[in-house]
């Protein structure tokens, strides 16, 4: 069982059960791990999408209010009974302060903070010009990103309510960057537990004949920067795009693959010369980059936020928004397949060391054990954090394009 030596009744709360994004797949991996450890797992979600199939024996309950992004007690019927029955509650991607507060009030809750919405009312801790935001949320400091005063007031209040609601819960983040951001917001001591990514067992032999751009095609993911860099580099190899979003139609000259399931995406990553990973926000982690490295594919990555967790090997790092630097990196890897293979192998080894199941699951297990034991570490005090639950990976020596 690992956590206590006996089956534990674990309740997972989520806004949705889906296979459409990295956070969704990470949640399914956590649920599968808990079920395989023999625990009695229930999932309560705001909605369940087609294709999101939990492991055998896992009960799924729809509690529609978990999908609400605002403070609302509506459609939360049955939540209290589920919370009462659970020995451990693990919350992922729930943004309704009422539900967050109810979970934290049990005194046995873990909350995974996937992104900035608990402490930033704007576009991911990023100023309009692309620079990281270093200020705490306030009316004056947030006016640059949220020009409408009424909307700004609502978002500031909602963000503050979310942050207050998780007090008393054990906070988990995917990267040291997110732990620092939470500490600055008044919640120090978050445990750093990254997603599991399994590396392929052998190095690649073929460098690939196309670049790949993937993920949600939205402004803060900056897919246009990736396409412009490829164009500026002279389109030396084809560019394939795996993803969907409002900017898809603006990406001209590329081969659109649409949304791919996990296995199909892994195959595409495994045949790419490199993954382009632009960004115009402070990326909380960037699981797609780790998945590329895991199959031996190098990443040309915009240096932002939590990408520091994995960009120390196998990557060419460029400043976020620096299209010219990304273009130069594209040219380098297009012209030198040997370099691409060398970088990819370094990345594959990094993933095998840092993100394998044997490296990650014990860290989550330690958090669960801490909460189940009633340790004072359930709060936000860094001094009381359980051994092994903080980031223990050393900083790498990143390459630069």
Image (tube, rainbow, N blue to C red):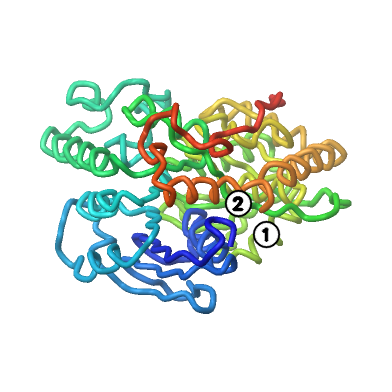
**Circle 1 residue:** 266
Mark yes or no: residue 401 visible. Answer: no
Mark 2: give few (<14), some (14-19) or many (20+) Cα within 10 Å. some
Task: Quadrant for residue 18, please give it.
Answer: bottom left
Side (left or right) of 399 relative to 341? left
Q: Is residue 16 above or below residue 359?
A: below
Task: Quadrant for residue 128, please give it.
Answer: top left
Task: Choose between 19 and 65: the one closer to the eye.
Answer: 65
**Circle 2 residue:** 361
Q: Is residue 49 above or below residue 149?
A: below
Residue at point 59%, 31% (across, down): 308
Give the percent coordinates (x, y) of residue 70.
20, 51
Give the percent coordinates (x, y) of residue 369.
49, 49
- Which callout, 1 or 2, points at the residue further toward the start of the chain? 1
Residue at point 54%, 46% (across, down): 366
Q: Is residue 139 above or below residue 347?
A: above
Quarter occupied by the N terminus? bottom right
Give the percent coordinates (x, y) of residue 101.
23, 49
């Amino acid at each position: 069982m690992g956590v206590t030596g006996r089956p534990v009744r674990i309740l997972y709360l989520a806004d949705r059960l889906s296979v459409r994004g990295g956070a969704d797949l990470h949640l399914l991996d956590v649920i599968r791990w808990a079920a395989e450890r023999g625990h009695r797992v229930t999932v309560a979600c705001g909605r369940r999408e087609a294709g999101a199939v939990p492991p055998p024996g896992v009960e799924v309950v729809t509690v529609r209010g978990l999908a609400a992004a605002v403070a609302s007690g509506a459609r939360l019927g049955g939540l209290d009974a589920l919370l009462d029955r659970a020995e451990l509650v693990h919350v992922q991607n729930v943004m309704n302060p009422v539900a967050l507060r109810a979970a934290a009030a049990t005194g046995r809750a873990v909350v995974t903070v996937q992104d900035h919405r608990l402490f930033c009312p704007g576009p991911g801790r990023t100023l309009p010009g692309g620079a990281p935001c270093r200020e705490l949320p306030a009316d004056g400091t947030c006016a640059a990103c949220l020009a409408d005063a009424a909307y700004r007031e609502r978002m500031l209040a909602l963000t503050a309510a979310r942050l207050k609601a998780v007090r008393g819960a054990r906070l988990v983040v995917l990267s040291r960057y997110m732990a620092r951001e939470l500490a600055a917001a008044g919640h120090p001591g978050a445990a750093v537990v990254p997603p599991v990514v399994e590396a392929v067992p052998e190095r690649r032999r073929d460098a690939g004949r196309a670049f790949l751009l993937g993920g949600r095609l939205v402004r803060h993911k900056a897919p246009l920067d990736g396409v412009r860099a490829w164009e500026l580099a002279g389109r030396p190899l084809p560019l394939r795009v795996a993803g969907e979003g409002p900017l898809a139609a603006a990406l001209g000259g590329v081969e659109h693959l649409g949304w791919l399931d996990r296995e199909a995406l892994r195959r595409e990553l495994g045949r790419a010369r490199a993954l382009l990973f632009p960004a115009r926000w402070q990326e909380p982690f960037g699981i797609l980059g780790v998945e590329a490295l895991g199959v031996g594919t190098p990443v040309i990555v915009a240096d932002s936020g939590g990408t520091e967790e994995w960009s120390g090997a196998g990557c060419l790092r460029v400043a976020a928004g620096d299209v010219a630097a990304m273009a130069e990196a594209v040219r380098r890897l297009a012209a030198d397949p040997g370099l691409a293979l060398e970088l990819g192998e370094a990345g594959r080894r990094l993933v095998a060391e840092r993100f394998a199941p044997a490296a990650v699951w014990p860290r989550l297990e330690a958090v669960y054990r801490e909460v189940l034991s009633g340790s004072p570490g359930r709060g936000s005090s860094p001094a009381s954090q359980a051994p092994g639950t903080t980031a223990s990976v050393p900083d790498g020596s990143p390459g630069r394009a």
